[in-house]
């Protein structure tokens, strides 16, 4: 399992109004901070378009291995982002992680 690509995704709603300057700042800061962690690959910021889901945004990223994913989770920048931004500004979320099968 250590050599398999992990795709980590989280869909979420912010406490800020959709499309507001504060929402934009959160998304831009998330991209800037989380992509500065060396293990993060293929980071995307996503906007929900389907009426089938009531989440507004998503972050998607890949890790080359389970070890890289675990390193990311413990990385000080990630821990700080979760503590000082995510827990403060996100109203609800769902996190999913997949192993790529190809």
Image (cartoon, rainbow, N blue to C red):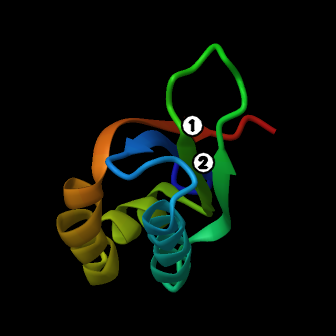
- Residue 32: percent from left, percent from top: 53, 81
Towards the viewer: 3 or 7: 7
- Residue 33: percent from left, percent from top: 45, 81
- Residue 65: percent from left, percent from top: 55, 59
What number is the disc on residue 77? none
Q: How many marks?
A: 2
Identify the image quadrant of residue 83: bottom left
Residue 77 to residue 45: above or below: below
- Please name the residue that numbered disc 2 is placed on: 7
In the rendered image, is residue 100 in sight? yes
| Earlier residue among tags 1 and 2 | 2
Q: Kindly identify the residue that appears in the image at 38 percent across and 52 percent down.
A: 16
Tell me if 32 is positioned left or right of 14 in this view: right
Q: Secondary structure at mark 1?
A: strand
Identify the image quadrant of residue 26: bottom left
Graded by Cα atoms within 10 Å as few (under 14), some (14 to 19) or many (20 or more), the crowding at tag 1 reads few
- Please name the residue that numbered disc 1 is placed on: 98
Q: Secondary structure at mark 2?
A: strand
Q: Kindly identify the residue that appears in the image at 31 percent across and 77 percent down.
A: 75
Whole-number angstrom distance, CA of label 1 to CA of label 2: 5 Å
Q: Kindly identify the residue that appears in the image at 69 percent across and 40 percent down.
A: 100
Towards the viewer: 78 or 56: 56
In the rendered image, is residue 74 in sight? no
Q: Kindly identify the residue that appears in the image at 58 percent across and 54 percent down.
A: 19
Tell me if 4 is positioned left or right of 89 in this view: right
Tell me if 75 is positioned left or right of 20 in this view: left
Question: Does the CB distance between marks 1 and 2 fall below 8 Å?
Answer: yes
Towards the viewer: 23 or 32: 23
């Amino acid at each position: 399992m250590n050599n398999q690509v992990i795709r980590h995704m989280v869909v979420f709603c912010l406490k800020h109004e959709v499309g507001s300057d504060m929402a934009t700042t959160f998304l831009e800061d998330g991209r800037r901070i989380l992509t500065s962690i060396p293990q993060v690959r293929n980071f995307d910021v996503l906007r929900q378009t389907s009426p089938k889901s009531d989440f507004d945004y998503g972050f998607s990223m890949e890790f080359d291995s389970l070890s890289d994913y675990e390193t990311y989770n413990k990385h000080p920048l990630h821990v700080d982002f979760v503590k000082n931004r995510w827990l403060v500004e996100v109203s609800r979320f769902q996190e999913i992680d997949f192993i790529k099968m190809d």
